[in-house]
Amino acid sequence: MRTKPHTAVLTAVLALLSAVLVSLPARAAAPDATVVPIQVTGPASSRFNLVVMGDGYTTAELPKFREQLDKHLNILWSIEPFKSYRNYVNVYAVEIASPESGVDCDPGLTDPKRDTPLQMGFWGGCNPNSVQRLLTVSQAAATQYADLVPGTTSANRQILAIGNSDTYGGAGGAYATASGGNALSALITPHELGHSLGGLQDEYDYYARGERGAPYVGPEPSSSHHTLLTEAQMLAQQQKWYRWLGEPSESGGTIGRYEGGMYAGSGVWRPSAHSMMKALGYYFDQPSRERMTQRISAKANLFQDSTPAGVVAADQVVWLQTLHPVDHELDVTWTLDGTTLPTANARSVDLATLDLAPGTHTLTATIVDPTEFIRDPAVRPTASRTWTVDTTVSGGQTVDPAFTGSTPTDHPVSADEVVYAETAQSAGAITWKLDGQPVANPGNDRDLDLAPLELTGRHVLTAQAGDQTLTWEVDGVDPDVAPTLSKPLLTVQKPTGPEYVYNDAFTMGLVAQDDTTGYVVPEFRVDGDGWYNYYGWPTDASAPYRFTVEGTEIDQLVYGKLGVPRVVPWDDVPPGYGRHRIEYRAIDATGNIGGARSFAVTLLKPAPVCTTTLTGTHDGPLSVRDGVTCLTGATVNGPVLVGAGASLVATDARVNGPVRAERAADLQLLRSTVAGPVSADGVTRSVVAVGSTVRGPLSVTNSRTTDSATLAGNTVDGPLSCSGNAPAPANLEAPNQVSGPRSGQCARL
C-alpha cells in the first residue's frame, strides 16, 4: 500500500495504515449494492477496469455521489494519456446506500463514527497517532463490493472509494480513496493511477510535509523518472528520459533535470519542475506519460478478435479486430512469407487475390501503436499473430457483416475523435456518411478520423454494414469559459485582450459551460507554463483562485504563486511582481478543447500599511506630516500637502484641490480624482498613480524610488512632465490620456 505524500504520513503511520486496512472486516450484513456500468468499452478480461464506490451516501444522497463521480471521470478524461486511451478503460460505479451520512472522524478525532458500508474514516481510521487527511477504507468491504462487477479481478482493476465529505483527504495504492466534495478530490485519482497502474514514484522533495527531505543516498534509482545522471550522461548512455531532453514539458517548463524527488530534497533528479507526480493539478510530463501509455496498453489486448490462429484456406478472408484509441488508429501490417503486403492498414486480407504458389505459406499480422507518446521502441505496444496458409485446403466462407462493437452511440463524439465500428468478421466494407453524404475512408474502414474534416457545429455520422446502421451525433461545439476577477486598480482593453493592474492579491473565478451534459473542466496557465486544473480554491471548491506574489501556504503546501510557481515553502523563486499573461480554456465531457483566451495582469507592490484612515468628507486643507494617511472612499474639500517622510494613499477618493508631495515617502493615487494640479518632488519610496483623474497638470521630479514611478491609465487635464527621476517613470503598457504636452521622462507615457 503506497500512501500519498499529500497524506504526509511517517513510516510508523504507514505500518499502522496497513494494519488498519487488513484488520477492518466487512460488516456482516452489508447493504445491498447496485453495479452501474458507466463506460464499457469491451470485455472486462481485456480492459483496465476502474471500479468506483461511494461511502457515506444515503439513498437521498446517491445523486450527489453520481455528480461527484462525473466530475472525477471528466477530469480524468481531460488528462493524457487517459484522454487518448479512454476506450481502453471500463468504468463501473458501485452504488451503496449508506445507513448514515458522512464518514468517520470528519474532520476531527472527536467527531462521531458513522455507520457506513466501507467504514471510511479520516485520521487513518480515527487513530490519534495518524494524520487527519489520511482517509482509509476497509479492504475487505471494498473487495467484497468490487467483486460484484463481473469479470474484474485484483489483477485487472483499480478500486477507488469516494467518501461523502468536503474535507481534504485521501490515500493511494492498490485501494485509492478520496473525499468526494473537496476541491482537489478529483485530482487524486489520476495521481493514484500513476502509482498503481504506472508504477510511477512520487516526485516530492519531502516526506513529512513542511520538512525538506534528506539528501538521497543510494544507487541509480530503478524509477524511470528519477536519476543520478547528468543530462550529458543520459544522452551519452541513452538512459532514462534522454529522448525527451530539451523539449517543452507537457506539465510546464522544459524537460531537463530538476533536483529533488522520491522524498529526497537533493541528490536525485526528476524530468520536470512540477509534473503531476510532483503537484496535483498539472499534467503528466512526457516521461511519465510514456510509462502510463505503456501500462494502459499492457492492461488491454491489442488483438481483440481474429480469424482463429492455425491453418487457413487459400481462398479465405483472414481478419482481425484491434483496440481503438480515441485520437489515432493503430497500424496493422500483413506479411506473407516475410514480404509485406500492400494492404494499406486494412484489418483483413483476401487470400484469394494473392495468386499463391502451391504449398504452405506463413501469414502474419502485426499491430503497432504509432502514438507519439512513446519513443522507446522497447515499450511500444506491439502484438503479432500468425496463420499457416495451405493451398490444398479450401473452405473460405462469406459471413454477413453485423456490428459487434463501436464507439458508444448513446452520447456525442467530439469533432476530432477517431470513431470506430467493428463487424463479426472483416468481410465487406463499412460505409461512412456525414450528414447523409459519403465520407472517403480508404485502407482501414473500421476507424474514421474526424479531425481532418475540421468540423464545427453539430453533425450526424453513420456507419453502415450490410443492412445495419450505427448513428452518432458529432459535437463540434467548443465549451465556453468566462473569468471573473476581483476589482482591479485599472482595466485596459486591447486587441490582444484585456489587461489589469493590481497592487495586492487578486482572485480569478472560472465558470465553464457547454451545451451538452457532464462536468466541464476549466484550466488555466500563467506565462506559458503548464496547464493547471481550475478547482476553485483548495479549501473551498466554490471560492475563486487567489494569486499572490509568494503564494498562500495551506497545509504546508503553496498555492496561487503568480509567475514562477512555488510548490513547497522552501522553493526559491522570484516573487510574482510585474506583468504576466494568464490563459484559460475548458474541456467538455465529449472531449472538445475550447480555444484559449487570455488577459494580462500587472501586480505592483502593495501600498504601505495605513496608520491613519480617513473616510467620509474632510472639509479644509489636509496636511500629512508623518505616518501613512489613507483616504479610502473619502472626499477632501481643500488642498493636500504630504510632508517629508510622510505617505498618502488615496483609493477611490476625491480631492477638491491640489495635491503636493515634497520629499514624501509615498504618494499613491489609486482610482482617485484630484480637482487640481498634482506635484511630487523628491519622493523617496514610491510614486504610483493608476486609473486616476487629475484636473490639472501632473509633475513628478527628482524621485529616488525603489521601483519606477508608476503612471498608468490616468486622465490628465493638462501637461504631464517628469524629470530627474531615478529610475525613470513607467506606464505598465497602459498609456495615459493627457490633454496637454508630455515632456521629459514622461514624453512617451
Image: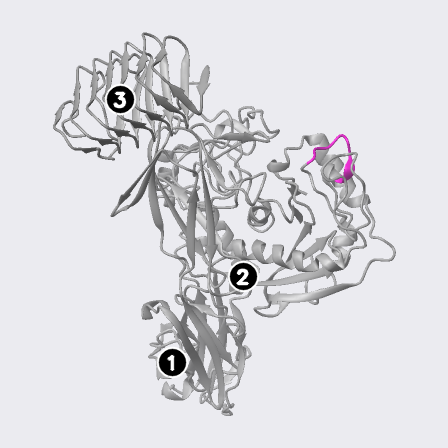
Q: Magenta region's main secondary structure?
A: loop
Q: Identify which residue, 514 or 641, lies in the foreground.
A: 641
Inspect the magenta stretch and tell me whether residue 345 lies in it.
no
Dot 2 crowding, Cα within 10 Å, few <14, some 14–19, many 20+:
some
Report x, y in % for residue 139: 75, 49
Residue under label 1, please give it.
435
Dot 3 crowding, Cα within 10 Å, few <14, some 14–19, many 20+:
many
Residue placed at 54% from the left, 71% from the top?
A: 304
Depicted 228 relative to depicted 96: above or below: above
Quarter holding the N terminus?
A: top right
Residue placed at 54% from the left, 73% from the top?
A: 410
Q: CA distance from mark 3 to mark 1?
A: 62 Å
Q: CA distance from mark 1 to mark 2?
A: 25 Å
Q: CA distance from mark 2 to mark 3?
A: 49 Å
The span picked out in magenta is 125-132
Residue 504 placement, left or right of 580: right
Residue placed at 42% from the left, 61% from the top?
A: 592
Residue 277 placement, left or right of 337: right
Is residue 247 visible to the viewer in this orientation of the structure?
no
Depicted 706 relative to depicted 653: above or below: above
Report x, y in % for residue 355: 36, 87
Which amino acid type is shown beneath numbered disc 1? Answer: Asp
Badge 3 vs badge 1, beta-carbon distance below 8 Å:
no
Residue under label 3, please give it.
709
